[in-house]
Amino acid sequence: MAGHWRINGFYDVTKLTGLFEAAQRRESCRSFAAAPSTEQWNALTHAADELALPGVRIALGLCDTSLFKPLLAGLVIKFENVQRFAAVIVRDREPQTVVDAGVSGEMFLLRAVELGLGACWVSGTYKRGQVGLRLEADERIVALLALGIPKRLPDLPIRRRRKEITALCPAFDSLNSAQQEIVQYVQIAPSAINLQPWRISPAGPSELTISVGTPGQRLDLGIGLCHALLALGSTPAQFSLGENALSATVRQL
Ligand SMILES: Cc1cc2nc3c(=O)[nH]c(=O)nc-3n(C[C@H](O)[C@H](O)[C@H](O)COP(=O)(O)O)c2cc1C
């Protein structure tokens, strides 16, 4: 699968600088002042087409806050004034496509942040019966992204609740600076219930393997890979997916 993974060569990395910067300003936003402007919405419509890998569809929709339930693993986390969302949809049954959906959805979310919007991945706390999108036979929604003008912007730099870098990557101190930046960019990525399921290890002198533990974490794997791709910038690299789509190796060329 190494050379053929559709992530390789799909994104024009020279256009991703804005998303690289947006990743530093991103935090999950659940309270919104208003819906995106018409201009922002048009830009999102374009981004949905441009940033979705083959096999993935990003569909925009109108909603109200009742689409989002307030509970997350026993914690009361409320959504406020959500008027727009994007659905991240896989178009086939391949495990790899869920990883691709993570990459595509995070690229799209960061584009929303770049446009001045706030956003939050939502895979658990929404009412599935209330989404109201037409899906083709093999299509399945893997997550929604709540979208809008944020009620307040985060104070920078963002103080994030994250595991120690050596918990994600025990060999962190022995990596070169380019590899360390990849690990640090994965560390700031969002993950379901903030589990930060990524384990990152050197696989060779210029190779890193990022893995997750369970099939339910493939979306998080893709989100982490999106951040790895952004951290690489214009450094040429090849991504290859492990057999079971639970790991991926990034090789700098
Ligand atoms: C795949 C995925 C699913 C998520 N599902 C939910 C959800 O159902 N409800 C929610 O309130 N937050 C959800 N989140 C947001 C996470 O809780 C959040 O990313 C994590 O706590 C880290 O915080 P940060 O995004 O502000 O860095 C989800 C995030 C991801 C990546």
Image (cartoon, grey):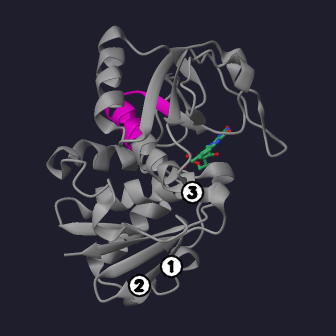
Viewer-nearest residue: 137 or 147: 137
Quickly name the residue at label 3.
218
| Image spot of residue 166 (x, y percent) | 53, 80
Dominant SS of magenta comes to helix
Q: Residues within 10 Å of mark 2 (few under 14, many from 20)?
A: many
List x then y, in percent, for residue 128: 71, 26
**Left or right of 72 in this view: 194:** left
Q: Residue at x 21, y 54 (%)?
A: 9
Q: Is residue 93 magenta?
A: no
Circle on res. 202: 2
Is 129 or 123 nearer to us in this picture? 129
Asked whether 72 or 101 is in front, the reply is 101
Dot 3: element: helix
Q: Residues within 10 Å of mark 1 (few under 14, many from 20)?
A: many
The image quadrant where one finds the N terminus is: bottom left
Q: Which element carries disc 1, helix, strand or loop?
A: loop
Q: Residue at x 61, y 65 (%)?
A: 197
How much space separates mark 1 and mark 2, taking CA atoms? 9 Å
Callout 3–callout 2 Cβ contact below 8 Å: no
The amino acid type, in three-letter code, at marker 1 is: Cys
Residue 92 pos. (x, y %): 52, 42
Residue topped by disc 1? 169
Bounds of the magenta segment:
107-119
